[in-house]
Image: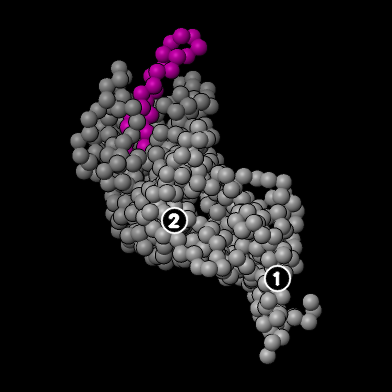
Amino acid sequence: MGSAVERFDNEARRKFDSLGRNEVYPGELLRHRVYTRFLHWMVALFFFLALFSGFGIYLPWLFRWFTPIFGGGALSRAMHPWFGLAFAVFFGLQMLNWLVPMRWTPADTRWIRNIRNVVSGAEKLEAPDTGFFNAGQKVQFWEIVIGCGVYLITGFILWIGADTFGRIAVAVSYVLHDISALIMLGGIFIHIYLSTIGEPGTFHSMTRGAVSEAWAWTFHPAWYKEMTGRDPRQAYEEARQRMRGAQTKP
Amino acid sequence: MSDRRTLQIKQMSAHPGPIPGGEPGKEVQRNYDVCKLVDTTTCIGCKACEVACVEWNDMPFAATTFDNTYQTMPETRWNFWNLIKFNEHQREDGTIQWLMRKDQCMHCADPGCLRACPADGAIVQYTNGIVDFQQENCIGCEFCVSGCPFHIPKFNNTSKKVYKCTLCSDRVGQGLEPACIKACPTGCLKFGTKDDMKFIAEERSKQLRENFGFQNAGVYDPQSIGGTHVIYVLHDATDPERYGGLPKDPQIPWSYTIWKWLAKPVLGTFALFGLLSVGLHYVMVGPRRPQPDPQEEGIHGKRG
């Protein structure tokens, strides 16, 4: 089973690399391959379509202006389940693609305990054992995995309706569906912030696939070490010396 | 939509801001709470009301379902809003009591369908108590089906809209009685103000208790949903379930009360606080840049 998933992922990654390309300049590392980026943006697209079509129905007295985007309330309602389904399918593929790097490790537990220093900006460099994904990213990933499960089950019940599943099943599903959406909405703010202005240099890992080495040794030192074989802290100190040297020279 | 001159809206589903047509209670005309009284003890099961309903509302022909009872079909349909439910109740002494109950929308004072509805103006309640679906605003989500304790709203899979009894709001708005009332030959159906119907129903129940030996006779006007604008006189008000599943204590799921009107806006605002908090993080703590950061090294270079 595990190996079948692996074979499928490898085949998909290979196929997509031949369809698109990764732009990695000198001094950069390849972070996300074409397949990962494709899945990420399909997930993002359908996430927002589902979010906006759903939010007009969730809080109509505040967000009724979302429904005209989809051609009115009736069409919003008709399309929302399909958007959601597409979101879940693409995220399901992404989940298979990321099963290995998203595995929880003792280093992640330490990262979570240390989260205060990360958020406050007290520690400029991530702990040296932070790998390809840090614990924050892993928490969000697994939250979406669970959230997608909740969406699929409750969404199906809401889609088919009370005539089949009974009014209590619909009433309960309605609340769970909303809670899952609210958690994901809160998460998406943090996700977008950190991948754009919150941690500059992150965004092009999802456009052309590459990040700078400095980005890698700062935010994912263990991954940097794995990729280059060099010690991230030492690489950082060397870069710092170079930078100071360049500065003191008139 | 029914005539707005005569039917003032009181409540509207998912509607922001004031209700169109003026403030309820300040309209020019007096508005009585209307009520339909169904005396199940005098219903003879002639189904004249079923036919009148289909005729007045111009419903297409609907195939009936024969299931070895006198009942036209198992339950109401999107194009069949008025159904006499036939139930055989076995008394303790083994004799059979044949119960006939006209099943239709109850026009609850606190309508679960309206509470559940997320579409602006798809369900309205007039000041006279009639709960009416406005199909042009319906988005076909079927939440009303889940909100209704009486299993009344029915979905039409072709038009993707939900339909139910209107209490002939078009007739009532013009001062006429509903079509079913007009067709009833026994006087089992009556129509008037809620106060009058309640009075007649109580009197009839008293008569049943005192003169006809139905000790448990009473009026069905469930207070758990604020009363209804269709009330029944039952031979045995302690067990309405036997009349084809009339709920003893109808409830609106808390999803459509506490969750929808309190938790949802509050939690939704919390989600927006997420946006606020990342914005504040940016301006107060600032972004985390790949290190060494040239700017930072330049500014804090001496700190080492």
Give how far across and how far down residue A11 sits, in percent: 42, 44
Which one is earlier in the sequence, the residue at label 1 or at label 2? Answer: 2
Question: Where, by quadrant of the figure, is residue A21 drawn?
Answer: bottom left
Q: Which of the numbered marks, if any, corresponds to residue A98? A: none
> Separation of disc 1 and disc 2 at Cα?
32 Å
Q: Chain of mark 1?
A: A
Label 1: element kind: helix
Q: Which residues are magenta?
A: B81-104
- The extreme right residue here reads B303
Q: Nearer the viewer, residue A192 or B235?
A: A192
B274 vs B137, left or right, is right
Question: Where, by quadrant of the figure, is residue B70 drawn?
Answer: top left
Instruction: Examine the rendering and report whether any part of residue B212 can be seen.
Output: yes
Q: Which residue is mark 1?
A: A238
Predominant SS of the magenta segment: strand
Q: Which of the numbered marks, if any, corresponds to residue A34? A: 2
Label 2: element kind: helix
Mark 2 residue type: Val
Q: Is residue A175 above or below residue A242?
A: above
Q: Nearer the viewer, residue A111 or A171?
A: A111
> Is residue B83 magenta-colored?
yes
Please report the residue visible at 20 percent of the width from the left and 35 percent of the height from the top.
Answer: B61
Please report the residue visible at 37 percent of the width from the left and 33 percent of the height from the top.
Answer: B103
B172 vs B264, left or right, is left
